Image (cartoon, coloured by chain):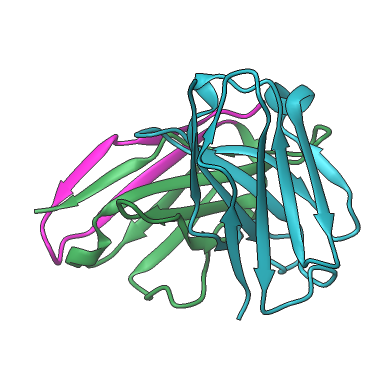
Amino acid sequence: QVQLQESGPGLVKPSGTLSLTCAVSGVSISDINWCSWVRQPPGKGLEWIGEIHPRGTTKYNPPLKSRVTMSLDTSKNHFSLELSSVNAADTAVYYCARHVAVPTTRGFDVWGQGTMVTVSS
Amino acid sequence: EIVLTQSPGTLSLSPGERATLSCRASQSVRSTYLAWYQQRPGQAPRLVIYGGSSRATGIPDRFSGSGSGTDFTLTISRLEPEDSAVYYCQCQQYDISPALYTFGPGTKVDIK
C-alpha cells in the first residue's frame, strides 16, 4: 500500500531554510494524487502549508507563500518542502499527506508519521 | 478565507455513549469538500470521514458524518476507549484561487 515518510534536519537556525523530503513507497510518484504538507506546532492544531501535483503544479497557503517552495523528484520518488527565513514560530511537526483519489471529494487519506523541526540557535 | 469553529472544545463521555461533534464554517462549504480526522497523542492524523459522509478505509461504522452548508457533524454512536483522541474537521475553499484547505481547532474526546 502507499506509504509516506518525512525526513530532514530536526534543528534549523533562525533565518535559515528548512528542507524536508517525503519519500513515497508503494506507488510511483508520477501516479500518486495531489499531496500536501501540513504542520502542527507543539500542543496546537493543524495548518495546511500547500500542495503539489505529480506534474509539478503547486499551490501554497497565502500566509506562507513568500517563503515556501515545493518540488518533486521522480527519479528518487519523493517530493520536497523548503521553507525559508524560518523563525521560532515555524517550530512544528511537519507531515506530508496524500489526497483521496475520489473525484469531487476532499480528504487526506495517507499520512507520513511526521518529523519534528525545531528552529533554534 | 473560511474559518472553521469546532464545539465543544472537550467532550467527556463514558464507553457506550454517543458523541456529537460540531464543525461550523464561516461561510457555506461544499459538503463533499468536508473531512474529519482523528489524532491520538503522538500520532499522525488519521482520516475518518471524507467527502462529508464517506467513511475512510478501516473506520468502523459507529463513525458517521453529516451536514450541509455551514453546519457539519461527526457522530460516534457507541464510544469505545480507543476513540479517545482529538478530532479535527477540514474543508477546502474552492471559490478562491488558490483553493485553500482549512482545519478547525479540534475537539478533544475523553473517554472516562
**Residue B2 shown in magenta:** yes
Q: Is residue B80 above or below residue B94?
A: below
The dominant secondary structure in magenta is: strand
Residue at x-position 75% and y-position 55% = A79
Q: Is residue A85 above or below residue A56?
A: above
Any idea which chain is the cyan one in this picture? A
Please name the residue shown 29% across and 53% down the image: B85
Quarter assignment of residue B70 = top right
Q: Is residue A66 magenta?
A: no
Q: Residue at left 17%, top 64%? A: B81
Q: Residue furthest front?
A: A121
Q: How many marks?
A: 0
Seen from the viewer's position, the closer of residues A53 and B71 is A53
Residue B82 in the figure: left or right of residue B91 = left
Task: Give residue A97's position: percent from left, percent from top.
Answer: 61, 57
In-front residue for pair B110/B45: B45
The chain letter of the green chain reads B
Q: Picture quarter containing residue A15? A: top right
Q: Which span of residues is magenta-colored?
A: B1-26
Q: Position of residue A22 (x, y in %)?
A: 66, 57
In the image: residue A100, left or right of residue B22: right
Residue A106's quadrant in the figure? bottom right
